Every structure is written in C-alpha cells, then in structure tokens.
Image (cartoon, coloured by chain):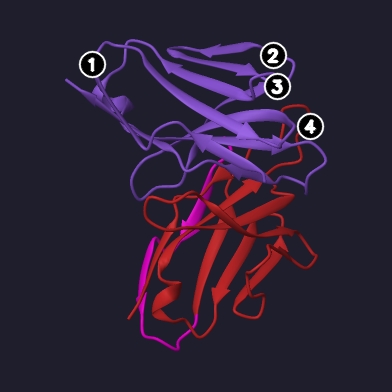
Amino acid sequence: SQKIEQNSEALNIQEGKTATLTCNYTNYSPAYLQWYRQDPGRGPVFLLLIRENEKEKRKERLKVTFDTTLKQSLFHITASQPADSATYLCALDILGGSQGNLIFGKGTKLSVKP
Amino acid sequence: GAVVSQHPSRVICKSGTSVKIECRSLDFQATTMFWYRQFPKQSLMLMATSNEGSKATYEQGVEKDKFLINHASLTLSTLTVTSAHPEDSSFYICSARGPWVGEGKTQYFGPGTRLLVL
C-alpha cells in the first residue's frame, strides 16, 4: 500500500543545534516533494519544494535533500531558534495524479528549547 | 503574494444547522481550490478539489451532498456543511493553486476554520 511517514511525532532540540526531520514514502513516484510549516490553529505555510532530479535545495537556514532511491527526504534547520517551533509537514506531489493533489504526512512537531 | 483568506475563523453551531465557509485568494487567480479537514494530531485529509465553473471532485468517503462546494469565481470557493453533526467538528482548511507552471503543484493555504457542532 502507499504510505508517507514522518519519522517521529515530536522532536525536541536545544537552541542553536541543527534539527533534522525525516520523510519516508513507499509505493509512490513523486515528481516533487514539498515541505510546509504549520503553527497551532493555522493553515500550513509553504517552505521548500525539491524536484525528483535534485539532490539538495537550500533556503536561508533550511536545507532539504531528496533521495529517490531510498525514497526519503531530509529537512534540516540549522542554528535552530525557539521561533522555529512548529509542526513540519512533508507532501508528495504525484506526477500524473489528479491535478494539484498533494499527499501529506502527519507531520513532526518540533520544539526548540532556549 | 499568494495570500489566501478564510472566513469565519471559528464557528460554533447547533446540530442540524448548516454552516458556510468562504475561501478567497486575495492577490491571484486560483484555477484550482482544495478543501481539507484536519483532526487533532492528524494529517491533512483532502476532501475535494474544485475548479472554477465546474463541479468539485470529491475524495472517496466524502459525502458530496453533505459537503457542498461552490467555486463560482477564480477567487472564491465556498464549503457548506449541511445538517452539521458533532462528528463534523474539525479544522477545515482551504488551499489554492494558481496557473503558474514549472514549480510543481505548490498550494497556498488559508488560515483554517475551526468548526464546533454542539
């Protein structure tokens, strides 16, 4: 069956450290993989998109990797800050799927302690 | 750019009443809008996809007669929960996608509507 899993429900780290979140999927062939941030009681906010033929993408303190052989994406936040505390969702963008359909993981709740 | 608004942000209603939620793209034309439902600590679950001027496409298990979707213009979609029951209480989020090409199917989300049915 098709699955998308984010490695842990919650991740606690100390301010200044690098947070690494994992997204694994099975039985999908995504053309793109996207990461979103969701704060409590709010809608998700788009962060980064990486294509299937890209290995890595960066945006300020964020870095995303995409390994289509391992069927895995890693999302890194360097020099983490308490303001980075939120739930992070990965989403698969399936080529040939119904237009605009994204498949979301359950998310990982990140807490950055000062 | 790419701002999506939702109204109301929170609604409490009695069982059996209908509730309408509006979703607007404020600074772009949304060729496609999506409605999601999210229960606590759960993933976003797509309910339906709608294109302006055509009928919505509902996901399996979502009752189209209960969740009426109207996408009357390129900037407005509405979701009406008809004859709401307590089990319909949830966080409803819309998203919109513009006609851009090349960068995948990035969606821009509204802030969500918290529905509580008593």
Tell me residue A82's x, y (percent). Answer: 24, 24
Q: Chain of mark 1?
A: A
Instruction: Please report the residue visible at 65 percent of the width from the left and 69 percent of the height from the top.
Output: B69
Label 3 – label 1 distance at C-alpha: 30 Å
Residue B40 or residue A22, whichever sits in front: A22
Instruction: Please report the residue visible at 69 percent of the width from the left and 28 percent of the height from the top.
Output: A32
In the image, is residue B61 above or below residue B111?
Answer: below
Considering every residue shown, the one lying at the far left of the view is A114
Residue bearing the label numbered 3 = A51
Q: Is residue B15 magenta?
A: yes
Label 4 – label 1 distance at C-alpha: 38 Å
Q: Chain of mark 4?
A: B
Instruction: Please report the residue visible at 38 percent of the width from the left and 50 percent of the height from the top.
Output: B41
Say whether mark 1 and mark 3 are on the same chain: yes
Which residues make up the magenta segment? B1-18
State which chain is coloured red: B
Q: What is the crowding at mark 4: few (fewer than 14 residues within 10 Å), some, or many (at least 20)?
A: few
**Amino acid, disc 2:** Glu
**Amino acid, disc 4:** Val
Please tell me which of labels 3 and 1 falls first in the chain.
Answer: 1
Tell me residue B21's x, y (percent). Answer: 51, 67
Q: What is the crowding at mark 1: few (fewer than 14 residues within 10 Å), some, or many (at least 20)?
A: some
Say whether mark 1 and mark 4 are on the same chain: no
Residue A11 or residue B104, whichever sits in front: A11
Tell me residue A101's x, y (percent). Answer: 69, 46
Whether residues under marks 3 and 4 lie with C-beta atoms below 8 angstroms apart, the answer is no
Q: Nearer the viewer, mark 3 or mark 4?
A: 3
Residue bearing the label numbered 2 = A54
Classify residue B76 as left or right of residue A30: left
Residue bearing the label numbered 1 = A15
Q: What is the crowding at mark 2: few (fewer than 14 residues within 10 Å), some, or many (at least 20)?
A: few
Which structural element holds mark 3? strand
